[in-house]
Image: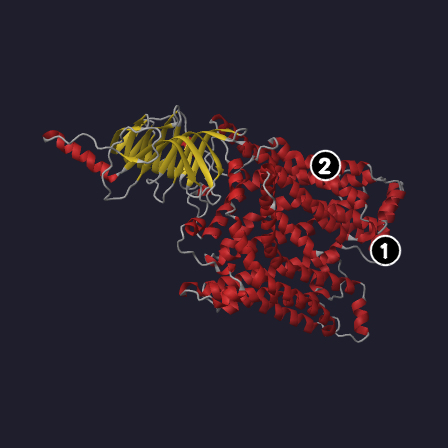
Amino acid sequence: LGLLLLTAIIFFHEASRFTELLVVASRSGLPMDALWRMIAAIIPGIFVFTLPISLLIGTLVGLGRLSGDSEIISLGASGVSRLRMLAPVIALALAVSCVMLYITLEVLPVSVRNLTNLKADQPLILETLNTQIKPRVFEESIPKKVIYIEDIDRTNNMWHNILLVDLDDDPRNMTIYTASSGSLRQGEREKMPELFLERVSVHRTSDSRGATPAVQDQPQQPEANVAQPEAQGNTPAAGAQGAPERERRRNRAQQPYTMARSQEMTLGIEVTDDKKEGAAGSFEKPPEVEEMTWGELLSYSPPPEGYREWSAEIHKRLSLPAACLVFALLGVGFGISNIRTGRSFGLLLGLAITIVYYLLALTGEHAAAAGRVPIWLGIWLANIVLTAVGVFVIYLQRKPGSDALSALASLRHYWTPAKNGGEESDLQAVTDSSNGRARNSSGAAGEARRRRTGLFSRVPGAQLVDRLILSDMARFFVYILAGFSALFIIITLFQLLNSITRHNIEWTVVANYLIYLLPMIVNYMTPLSALVAVMVTFGILQKTSQLIALKASGQSIFRLAAPALLASLLMSAFIFVNQDYILPFTNRRQNNLRHLIRSGQEPPQTFYQTTNQWIFGVDSRIYNYAHFDVATNSFFQLNVLDLSRDPFSIKRRIYARSASWDSAKREWVLENGWERTFQDDRNTGFEQFKERRIQVAENPEYFKKDPRGSASMTVAELRRKITDLSRSGFDVLDLKIALQSKIAFPLTCLVMVLVGLPFSFSVGKRGALYGVSLGIAIGLAYWGLLGLFEQMGRYEMLPPTLAAWGPNMLFGAGGLYLFLTSRT
């Protein structure tokens, strides 16, 4: 059960990519094999993570239940030693280790390789590009290409007024295509996607020194399809005219520029460099060590600089299966206890031990990558330390009365009512109160009730039954939220482990990242935790027959559900405050830290404003720049393109190595650049300058449009950005969906509680773990539907409001119907 739950949670954590593939494939009629292949490639990587944790949780829950029912005491009294009890657990751990060994040595490398190959699935990429590219938006999903389209005819699959840029490492060197119309279609050669363009103009610059002088363009026929160099200008005159002419020629030699015109043109879209190299028959790069099977790994001779990575991969392939044996040892040591614990406690304890294991593994791998410890010691550090802890705990348990969980007894007893009549006395007080015969409780029962209801004793208008339900729900909510948050942190660390070790990231950076990530984790996990807490709370009331007694005393399930619904509204308010006042700051900070961990360097500009930024200005003007300094209002490597409408082409182009704003004269000062003018796709002028002043409609504030994503903005900021971009003609569909989601998501707590209530009344005698499992299943179904609706909205299959509110409407209506038709 633990394996299924954990695998499902991690699987749905990656649900966005699956829902996008599902929407694309269903809309275009593509076969679903790419979706199934991606799922099959991801599942082994999830199993490597969940199999050891599930074995640990299963051992803790199973042995904890045996201890709670005093069966361990009976086994000990009959002469069965702790080592004998360890034997079946070790046997199970050996079986799981063998499965893990096969996955890590053979299956996982193939899965990683297949996942890499799936990124180049051409039919799927073609359809994804066709649906994702939106009008008046700079699309940069194709490597080293930028596409801008003014209008898209979805019915006929035609694009109008197209700007395509082939980028170079140097922003001065780029090829710009302008076309009046075109479309993206599947190519016949090697099934490569092709971009078909009509009435095309090509502008190409090169900053290579020593190139032959470029000459001015000659008129050519529309059907020509080859780029022509600029035709030679007038013969330089003697005397006074010779020097200026020679200067102009020398400037042209420094900036070669070629143009071409064509009635039709077809460009192949090559998605990855790997495919490009393979098609050209050039040297193929060897696979990464994580993509090698065990035999390939052993026969591989790494270069000196890759020896540590290769050696670490070998030890890692063996240490992960060995972790199953370590977890089995810890499960026996901590699972056999004199303290009565529930199965949910074993779940939380297993997650806590897993966190410790992966923190030790991260520390050891980080130290090994830095060369501070031998590679084998760094990779095996977590196994060595926790094995020693497990052996020590089992050795201590040989002494009568010793218990590994004795330190947790006081904490647990704080929440748990006394054994001698606690639950019965609480129930009696509740039933008497409901009939107007409330009486004071004394002794252990009264103290137990005061402990359970003390936190909510001052809630105005709350009866004793309300305080009991709220206290139990709050207790389970904190436990479950802590467990889910811990699981999310484990998943995050597991995903970033390679990046942390590869870039030698300091511990303080990782700790800061997790601290700033925690508010987002809490925001996502609160609705699911509320659902599970409600199901566990009322499930236990049903299992212990307290719900039957409450009904018999005249309490309806609608009255009993009132405090839970009130708590869900408070949680919804908390989520709204958190996402509107806390997350905009923490998300920006954790995005920067994640970029640092992933790439090993700070983002090029605060809050992810990337290089090679493209912005559409007024009067059909496009700006491209490598960097914009918001403090000094200055550009680095600025390109300005003035476009003509009919035909759609470039009429003027300005390049400047730097540009700054003169606030006194309200104009831009361009330095070290050149200007070219065109008419009817002919080069009509060229001038190089040291300094040039221009007045345009765009001031520095225009380029300070908020580069943050919707997750790093408040509702008010997002509304202002939608209004601002809409006035500029930009497509704001994704932002509209994000705005509606920010309003709809806080109410997810109310929806989850409303759905969980009717199911919790039917849990019966199955116990808390059944409620946890059912709650997680319902939550995962909701999250899967949420991702599906969001993708359908992005592909314009649903309006933004329905894309954001659809899951709440469906689940809310279903939960309300089941709740109102429940027996009361």
Q: Along the horizontal axis of the image, is 562 left or right of 360?
A: right
Residue 678 is situated, as x and y percent measured from the top left of the image, at 31, 27
Which residue is at the front of the view, 136 or 232?
A: 232
Q: Secondary structure at mark 2?
A: helix
> Which residue is drawn at the image coordinates 75% and 63% (left, top)?
339
User: Which is in the foreground here, disc 1 or disc 2?
Assistant: 2
The crowd level at tag 1 (other Cα within 10 Å; few <14, some 14-19, many 20+) is some
* In this view, 550 is above or below 621: below
**Dot 1: element:** loop
User: Left of 787 or right of it: where is 595?
Assistant: left
Residue matched to label 2: 812
Disc with the residue nearer the chain's start (1 vs 2): 1
Residue furthest to the left: 239
Amino acid marked by disc 1: Gly
Numbered badge on residue 421? 1
Looking at the image, which is closer to me, 148 or 56?
148
Q: Is residue 281 visible?
A: yes
Q: Is residue 690 above or below residue 62?
A: above
State the colouring used for the structure image: secondary structure
- Place residue 741 in its image quadrant: top right
Percent of width and height locating residue 776: 70, 48
Among the 4 quarters of the image, the one containing residue 631: top left
The residue drawn where x is 64% and y is 64% is: 99
User: Residue pushed farthest bottom?
Assistant: 79
Measured as percent of width and height from the top left, residue 359 is found at 57, 60
